[in-house]
Image (spheres, rainbow, N blue to C red):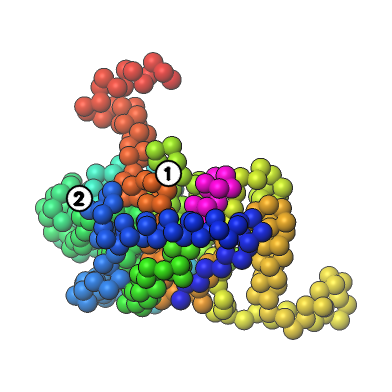
């Protein structure tokens, strides 16, 4: 179960204020639950944990097995924003951090930036591998993945021929619309559907996340089970609901204590990408209409030696949300040393994770003393089941929190602004008038 511990906020928050925000969060909970709020045509993510048919998982497994039979050892997953962050988060959390399992394909991500060097170096790897590609774009028209896909598609076609290329490319896109759908039909690619009512940042439990995670060799049934367990946990209308508690406390921090920044902290480098996924989820869902908590992330103890200084001592604009893992999957014990020159013998016989836990407690107290309230969210361990729990927990909490804040959680009008300028500067047909205007400003 996902647990929320608010003790680290006690010295900053009056109980009566917290109760007031719990009441507000319960009103927001009703809006999400009864589907009466803005953006209620984008609530399909709520049905994914327990409504995903077995046939869809079998289709994902068929792609995995087909590519294994073809000897594929590199899968390029092309997508940006919600079309890649969830899968990448899961894989960074689950993969061995140093060794590639030879029984599984290596999965790399492209189309999430426009760096020429990134793409060129990714293609260096492709040249040396047996490549397949999952291209993911709900709209089917996003520039970054479209550019990467053009290059990867050409490579696959040249190496394996058009017929085999059609077996080595799978598209995840809209059921009916968009350039990627048209191309897939024309080329005969296998396709998976991003449901109409599921927005990018809420799509990790749809084929957008499930397909790459399954192809990488992980158990997506367990992930959906974990998400379903979290769904049961956050589908109760009371003050013990952890999503209600988290939504209430973070809005209290924002409105009553003037905290404008939330730092999502983890003590395990496996979860560095969880911060990236969470930043998109909350940033795109809440940052609008001049409102919203700025979502930042940090990985401790690493970042205690960099931005730790600011968190302890800089502008008191922030609170922390620590995602903690109760049990380590591995054990490394610190040994004893006769000379003890490093003076670490007092730790001999201790697990490294014990030191990590003590660092976390020490940091918690120091940050509280420094004026940084702390929310703690914990799961038992890192595996598919618990990652599924975290995904659904944060999605539900985000919906409740954004409604409490007073915004539509499911639109993202702000992401269009840069695109118009970029298209004009790239001289995309149809943008001629804007090109002249923009050039005058530069
Ligand atoms: O959350 C979102 O809606 C966005 O981040 C999209 O996922 C992102 O812009 C990619 O869009 P698309 O899947 O249409 O290429």
**Outermost residue to the bottom:** 349
Q: Residue at x 29, y 22 (%)?
A: 434
Place residue 339 in its image quadrant: bottom right
Q: Is residue 250 magenta?
A: yes
- Quadrant the C terminus occupies: top left
Confirm whether residue 237 shows in the render.
Answer: yes
In the picture shown, does residue 267 fall above or below 80?
below
Q: Position of residue 337 (x, y in %)?
A: 82, 80
Q: Residue at x 83, y 70 (%)?
A: 342
Q: Read off the residue under disc 2.
A: 180
Q: Position of residue 284 (x, y in %)?
A: 39, 47
Q: Residues within 10 Å of mark 1 (few under 14, many from 20)?
A: many
Residue 10 shown left or right of residue 178 in the figure: right
Q: Position of residue 62 (x, y in %)?
A: 23, 74
- Which residues lie in the magenta part? 248-261
**Outermost residue to the left:** 186
Nearer to us in this view, 359 or 180: 359
Mark 2 or 1, nearer chain start: 2
Disc ID at residue 248: none
**Outermost residue to the top:** 440
Residue 299 shown left or right of residue 418 in the figure: right
Disc ID at residue 287: 1
Confirm whether residue 308 shows in the render.
Answer: no
């Amino acid at each position: 179960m996902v647990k929320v511990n608010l003790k680290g906020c006690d010295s900053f928050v009056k109980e009566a204020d917290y109760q007031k925000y719990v009441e507000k969060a319960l009103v927001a909970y009703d809006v999400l639950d009864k589907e009466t709020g803005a953006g209620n045509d984008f609530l399909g993510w709520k049905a994914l944990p327990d409504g995903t048919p077995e046939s869809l998982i079998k289709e994902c497994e068929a792609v995995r097995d087909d590519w294994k039979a073809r000897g594929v050892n590199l899968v390029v997953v092309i997508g940006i924003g919600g079309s890649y962050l969830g899968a990448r988060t899961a894989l960074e959390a689950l993969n061995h951090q140093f060794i590639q399992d030879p029984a599984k394909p290596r999965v790399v991500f492209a189309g999430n930036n426009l760096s020429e060097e990134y793409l060129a170096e990714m293609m260096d790897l492709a040249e040396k591998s047996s490549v397949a590609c999952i291209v993911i774009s709900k709209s089917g028209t996003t520039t970054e993945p479209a550019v990467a896909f053009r290059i990867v598609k050409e490579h696959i076609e040249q190496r394996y021929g058009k017929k085999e290329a059609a077996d080595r490319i799978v598209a995840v896109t809209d059921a009916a619309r968009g350039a990627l759908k048209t191309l897939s039909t024309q080329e005969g690619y296998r396709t998976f559907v991003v449901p109409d009512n599921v927005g990018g940042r809420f799509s990790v439990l749809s084929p957008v996340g499930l397909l790459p995670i399954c192809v990488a060799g992980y158990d997506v049934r367990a992930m959906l089970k974990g998400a379903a367990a979290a769904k049961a946990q956050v589908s109760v209308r009371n003050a013990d609901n952890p999503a209600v508690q988290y939504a209430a406390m973070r809005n209290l921090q924002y409105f009553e204590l003037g905290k404008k920044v939330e730092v999502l902290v983890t003590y395990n480098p496996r979860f560095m990408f969880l911060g990236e996924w969470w930043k998109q989820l909350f940033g795109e869902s809440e940052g609008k209409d001049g409102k919203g908590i700025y979502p930042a992330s940090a990985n401790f103890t690493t970042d205690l030696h960099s931005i730790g200084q600011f968190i302890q001592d800089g502008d008191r604009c922030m609170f922390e949300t620590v995602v903690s893992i109760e049990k380590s999957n591995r054990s490394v014990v610190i040994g004893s040393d006769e000379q003890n020159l490093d003076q670490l013998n007092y730790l001999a016989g201790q697990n490294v994770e014990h030191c990590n836990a003590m660092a976390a407690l020490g940091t918690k107290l120091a940050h509280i003393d420094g004026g940084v309230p702390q929310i703690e969210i914990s799961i038992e361990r890192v595996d598919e089941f618990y990652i599924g729990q975290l995904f659904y927990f944060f999605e539900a909490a985000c919906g409740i929190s954004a409604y409490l804040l007073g915004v539509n959680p499911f639109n993202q009008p702000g992401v269009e602004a840069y695109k118009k300028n970029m298209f004009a500067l790239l001289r995309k047909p149809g943008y001629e008038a804007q090109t002249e205007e923009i050039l005058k400003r530069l």
